[in-house]
Amino acid sequence: MSGIRMRLIVLVLITVCALQIAAWQGNQPAVNSSGPALGKWNFTAKDSEGVVWTGTLTVSKVDPNRFDAGKYHSLCNIEAVSTKGGLGVEHPSKYDPSTRTFSFGEEGNWGGSTYTAVLSANDKKLEKGKWRQSDRDFDSKKLVVVASGDWSAELIGK
């Protein structure tokens, strides 16, 4: 009788452990090492003045003649408009699969623009995006943020 009880207890413990592991794995975010899909994305941004920008983010394959394909995920091109005018940006992008963070742009000695966002769990949205544009202030010799805001994008086609 004690042998049957012991086997039953071991079986119950194994089942409980297996269920705990399955529950833990189900709560982990999906990790997609390939990053955002190549294709067209609906782009929407709102700057710090409340102006809304809408347009297209095109994510395309990196041209190895222009950029190091081993260093970059893709090439990003934003074409957007607002009541302020138009916006055109093109930069190679990087993707960090551990944080699902997608980023592109650069900021050098003379200024520039940077964009970051998080790829959604279903890989169809870029969310929680932040962007900023800076220029060099020649009097203070420092970079000054001239515009910033939030942005997002939703995949519309490959």
Image (cartoon, rainbow, N blue to C red):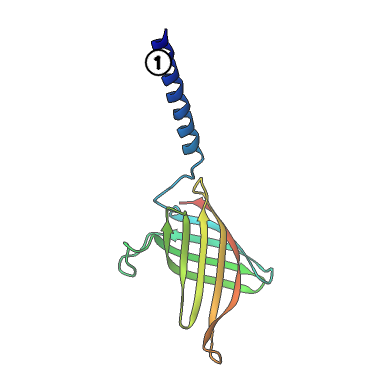
Q: Position of residue 15 (x, y in %)?
A: 45, 24
Residue at horizontal 45 percent and vertical 24 percent from the top: 13
What amino acid type should be assigned to the residue bearing mark 1? Arg
Rendered view: 56 above or below 6: below
Q: Examine the rendering and report whether any part of residue 96 can be seen.
A: yes
Farthest-out residue, bottom: 139
Mark yes or no: residue 43 visible.
no
89 horizontally vs 3: left or right: right
152 left or right, relative to 34: right
Position of residue 83 measured from the top left corner of the image (x, y, whole percent): 67, 71
Toward which corner of the image does residue 47 lie, by quadrant? Answer: bottom right
**Residue placed at 50% from the left, 80% from the top?**
111
> Mark 1 highlights which residue?
7
Residue 145 placed where, x, y %?
58, 77
Of all residues shown, which one is farthest toward the top?
1
Residue reaching furthest front?
Answer: 2
Pick whichever, 17 or 124, lies toward us. 17
Q: In which quarter of the image is residue 81?
A: bottom right
Residue 52 in picture, x, y percent from top left: 65, 65
Q: How crowded is mark 1: few (under 14 residues within 10 Å), some or many (20 or more)?
A: few
The residue depicted at 39 percent of the width and 51 percent of the height is: 34
Q: How many labels does the image show?
A: 1
